[in-house]
């Protein structure tokens, strides 16, 4: 296009910017008429009709808004394109400029390329409107279709609207292709869900009360303030590594090695076995423990413990949840009871020491009396010298005794649980057939309790280690035999009566004083032992009320519905259908919308003629 005779009115109060823009326009071959304020611009417009007006909004004397309104209100000037150059970048300023007649809007500072592109586009559109006016084609008013500013973000609202319209048109033009792609992906998603192994979910919920204080074992006020929350360590107890290994052995997961595995870990194990050789039992246990750690979860609230598991086999899922629940109850029982049994063992050790001291002192008093009466003193009984006895050996003996008590308590708890399950089994078997799910579930629970749990195995292992340590320190196994008859309590009334007999020998006063102190200490220890045993019986009886299974595990009847993969698959089907339609439209390279003409050819669309 020949622009040699085209005139541009440049209105800018900043002399530096005015000179720079004038240079841009002159290099384009345009004739530039300058104005430094709005009043001068209005005077020039009254004398001439330029091909383009480039003006700032903030001008002295008369603003750029008034100049725009003057141009649009004048019949001779209203078709002149107006390029606004302003430092105001707010959307409200741009919208207001478009409302009063601006054809384009450039935000300062702008580059030479941005400015020259806008000027060239506006001059072309002006020439095209003159041609269309001569041909009688209805044209669009320039200020009603504002151009996209050069400084706007890459994805403006108008562009986004255009692109979405193009995509919607692509879907309309390629309905069959979109439907085929969507159907194939959706069918593939459903088929994959049918082919992939199913998973089953089992959940158990336990209600737990806070442990009550034990006033016979210490300061009841301190115990009341520091009562142990029963759900505090539930997750650590159930998901501990040795407990998971015990869970694997109790449920015989290794017997069904392949079906117990999930597809991806099983494939990984097969590949590793091909490289390293045959998989050992230890490797299988380690792999299953890692899977259990991911699939078994525990949610511990303030008064409830929820145990859940997802597993590819329904029977194994039920057994795992049931055994995990039993192991948790067993661990809590052992923890609560062991505190009392350990205290009883310690108190009994101190009571035995006090008793030996009493008997030694009584023997001394008797020997002194017999010697004073002229009778030959009886041979002194051999009693242990507690100062010479290895204190560590005594501590080991106390710990061993406490560990045996704890094992006996856990085994008693398991036997009572087995008795309850057998009673439930007899009741269910009389109502239902042997193949009923409730009967089978009870059989599996009884079978799981028949083998040692991880806790019981750990306790027995600790017992053997303490027994070995006791022997290494020179202890006599007969003194701590598990089947040894318990030592009868000392008759302190008889001892006090014997010690209180009158005597003229004042040398026995000190021995009698020591005897009285030892007897008082022994009586105090025996009272504490009796109180602790009452607490032990109370704790055993109250455990069933403090811990109640409010939601026992049930055999799952149907697998989980994978809603998330299904939703993801259908979303992917929609997206792929959308992409396929758009790709096919782009491949055809057809221009079907007016914005494509403006975008690709940099020409404004003046009118659209619909085919009759």
Image (cartoon, grey):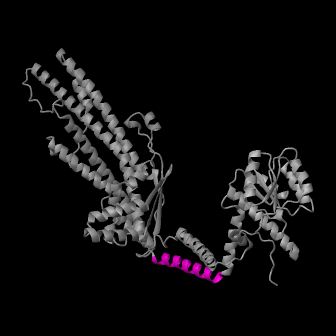
Pick the front one: 240 or 420: 240
Residue at x 73%, y 74% (from the top left corner): 593
Measuring from the top left, give residue 134's x and y in whole percent: 88, 74
- x 47%, y 45%: residue: 210
Q: Is residue 411 visible?
A: no
Left or right: 429 with respect to 609? left
| Residue located 52% across and 71% down the image | 561
Q: Is residue 278 visible?
A: yes
Q: Is residue 191 magenta?
A: yes
Chief SS of the magenta region? helix
Residue numbers of the magenta segment: 174-195
Q: Is residue 485 above or below residue 560?
A: above
Q: How many marks?
A: 0
The C terminus, quarter of image: bottom right
Relative image position of residue 505 (x, y in whole percent): 17, 16
Image location of residue 587, percent across then percent down:
61, 78
Image point 26% across, 31% down: which residue?
Answer: 492
Residue 258 location (% of width, % of height): 34, 72
Image quarter of residue 242: bottom left
- Residue 30 in the image: above or below residue 607: above
214 in magenta: no
Residue in the foreground of this view, choosing between 61 and 325: 61
């Amino acid at each position: 296009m020949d622009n040699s005779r085209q005139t541009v009115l440049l209105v800018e109060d900043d002399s530096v910017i005015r000179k720079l823009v004038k240079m841009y326009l002159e290099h384009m071959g345009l004739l530039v008429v300058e104005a430094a304020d709005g009043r001068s611009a209005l005077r020039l417009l009254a004398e001439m009709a330029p091909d383009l007006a480039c003006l700032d909004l903030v001008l002295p004397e008369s603003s750029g808004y008034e100049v725009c309104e003057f141009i649009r209100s004048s019949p001779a000037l209203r078709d002149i394109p107006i390029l606004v150059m302003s430092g105001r970048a707010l959307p409200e300023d741009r919208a207001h400029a478009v409302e009063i007649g601006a054809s384009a809007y450039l935000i300062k500072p702008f580059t030479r390329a941005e400015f020259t592109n806008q000027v060239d586009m506006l001059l072309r559109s002006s020439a095209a409107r003159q041609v269309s006016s001569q041909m009688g084609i209805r044209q669009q008013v320039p200020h009603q279709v504002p151009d996209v500013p050069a400084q706007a973000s890459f994805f403006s609202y108008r562009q986004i609207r255009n692109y979405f319209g193009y995509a919607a048109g692509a879907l309309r033009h390629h309905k069959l292709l979109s439907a085929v792609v969507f159907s194939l992906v959706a069918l593939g998603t459903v088929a994959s869900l049918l082919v992939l192994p199913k998973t089953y979910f089992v959940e158990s919920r336990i209600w737990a009360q806070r442990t009550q204080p034990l006033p016979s074992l210490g300061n009841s006020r301190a115990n009341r303030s520091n009562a142990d929350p029963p759900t505090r360590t539930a997750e650590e107890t159930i998901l501990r590594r040795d407990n998971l290994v015990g869970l694997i052995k109790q449920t015989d997961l290794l017997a069904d090695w392949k079906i117990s595995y999930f597809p991806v870990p099983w494939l990984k194990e097969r590949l590793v076995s091909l490289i390293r050789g045959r998989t050992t039992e230890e490797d299988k246990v380690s792999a299953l423990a890692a899977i259990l750690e991911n699939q078994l979860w525990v949610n511990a609230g303030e008064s409830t413990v929820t145990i859940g598991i997802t597993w590819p086999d329904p029977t194994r899922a039920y057994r795992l949840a049931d055994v995990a629940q039993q192991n948790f109850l067993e661990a809590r029982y052992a923890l609560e009871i062991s505190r009392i049994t350990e205290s009883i063992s310690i108190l009994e050790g101190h009571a035995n020491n006090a008793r030996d001291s009493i008997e030694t002192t009584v023997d001394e008093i008797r020997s002194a009396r017999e010697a004073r009466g002229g009778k030959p003193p009886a041979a002194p009984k051999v009693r242990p010298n507690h100062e010479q006895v290895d204190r560590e050996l005594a501590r080991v003996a106390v710990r061993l005794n406490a560990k045996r008590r704890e094992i006996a308590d856990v085994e008693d708890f398991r036997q009572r649980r087995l008795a309850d399950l057998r009673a439930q089994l007899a009741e269910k078997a009389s109502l239902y057939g042997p193949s009923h799910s409730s009967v089978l579930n009870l059989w599996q629970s009884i079978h799981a309790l028949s083998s040692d749990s991880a806790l019981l195995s750990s306790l027995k292992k600790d017992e053997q280690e303490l027994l070995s340590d006791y022997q290494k320190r020179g202890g006599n196994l007969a003194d701590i035999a598990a089947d040894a008859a318990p030592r009868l309590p000392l008759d302190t009334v008889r001892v006090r009566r014997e010690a209180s007999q009158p005597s003229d020998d004042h040398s026995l006063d000190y021995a009698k004083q020591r005897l009285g102190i030892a007897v008082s200490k022994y009586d105090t220890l025996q009272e504490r032992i009796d109180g602790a045993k009452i607490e032990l019986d109370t704790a055993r009886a109250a455990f069933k009320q403090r811990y109640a299974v409010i939601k026992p595990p049930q055999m799952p009847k149907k697998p989980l519905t994978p809603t998330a993969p299904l939703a993801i698959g259908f979303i992917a089907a929609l997206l792929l259908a959308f992409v396929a339609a758009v790709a096919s439209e782009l491949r055809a390279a057809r221009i079907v919308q007016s914005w494509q003409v403006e975008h690709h050819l940099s020409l404004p669309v003046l009118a659209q003629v619909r085919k009759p």
